[in-house]
Image (spheres, helix red, strand yellow):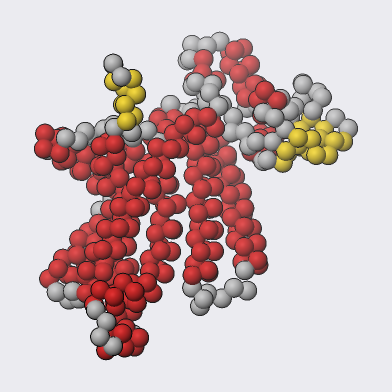
Amino acid sequence: MLKLILRKLIYGLLVIAGVICVVFFLFNILPGDPARMMLGQRADISSVDAINRELGRDLPLFTQFRFYVNDLSPVSIYNIKDSASRSYFDKEKYGASKILIPFANEALLVKKPYLRRSYQTQQRVTEILLDALPGTALLAFVSLAFAAIVGIIIGVWSALRYRTFSDQLNMFISVLGMSVPSFFAGILIAWVFGFVWSDVTGLNMTGSIYEIDPFKGEVLTLKNLILPAFTLGIRPLAVIVQLTRSSMLEVLSLDYVRTAKAKGLSDYKVIVNHALRNAMNPVLTAISGWLGSLLAGAVFIEYIFGWKGVGKVTVDALENYDFPVVMGAVLMVSVFFVIINVLVDLLYARLDPRVRVE
């Protein structure tokens, strides 16, 4: 098991390193001058050059990359004395740190990862993303809970009604759910239930978990969670239905299930205590794996429904060419995705003894 953990950690670090390289070089070759965005198109050249120097964009690209990695890494090398150096460690900018190994004017430091500041608001990217993260996490967890509960129930029902009309109907709907793109489903659901039938449903096309009331201030509005959570949960719901159905059909055909029935156990006990418990291993693994995908795939859903989360913040920042926010959001989602997938692999190895751990 230890070898598996080390292998997965190394794999995760390599993936994160690859994402950092792609994100940095991709957004640094895109057109657009951050200094012009911050100062306006009528800014004079000297002001633009000063901002670019402050941002380090006057340096060679690979030097910028080295400083960027230094900012991101929790263990970094900085010049701690010469404030004229581009690699000077500024506590106001980077926060508290601990010097591990001092040598000459430089030192090996332990610090918080620094995602830099927004071009538009000058707010720390970390603060922007952490403010939006609870909305995305809530949306992803509620969507996954809805998909898991409903999907398992429908999957078990279809397995027990194998090749009947209800089984075929469930399979048709699940295939349809996997085929329809999320952005199209989001637009259609928002228009139908949030606009056309809004008088019946009482739901809005757009809205976040908190709404501003002129008299009460911020008001918790849970109904705004219904449509985006339902839309985001459609695809994992369809997958869980088919996976639960196939797993249950396989387990129901095994000898120990037939033996349990022959002993006179009720259908409920046979299904819940014997069949369902043993059929849940692949389903639980799939559910765990979907959490990372939902965190990463909520971008369009949040934007369509106006849900305040990392996805909407990312799209808004991309529209304004606010590259530090976009880069920070991509990196944060990638880190969460890698961590969740590593944990899922370890969970699968724990649940399924057939997995070979070398």
Residue 61 image offset from top left, x and y in percent:
65, 35
Residue 6 image offset from top left, x and y in percent:
65, 62
Q: Quadrant of the N terminus?
A: bottom right
Q: Nearer the viewer, residue 157 or 74?
A: 157
Q: Nearer the viewer, residue 338 or 33?
A: 338
Q: Is residue 9 above or below residue 247?
A: above
Residue 273 horizontal side relative to residue 356, left or right: left
Q: Is residue 245 above or below residue 57?
A: below
State the residue at coordinates (29%, 32%): 221
Residue 41 image offset from top left, x and y in percent:
47, 15
Q: Quadrant of the C terminus?
A: bottom right
Q: Nearer the viewer, residue 37 or 116?
A: 116
State the residue at coordinates (42%, 69%): 281
Residue 48 horizontal side relative to residue 307, left or right: right
Residue 14 horizontal side relative to residue 196, left or right: right
Mark yes or no: residue 314 visible. no
Mark yes or no: residue 47 visible. yes
Residue 117: which quarter of the image?
A: top right
Residue 64 image offset from top left, x and y in percent:
66, 34
Q: Is residue 207 above or below residue 149?
A: above
State the residue at coordinates (46%, 28%): 321
State the residue at coordinates (41%, 64%): 284
Q: How many marks?
A: 0
Q: Nearer the viewer, residue 72 or 345?
A: 345
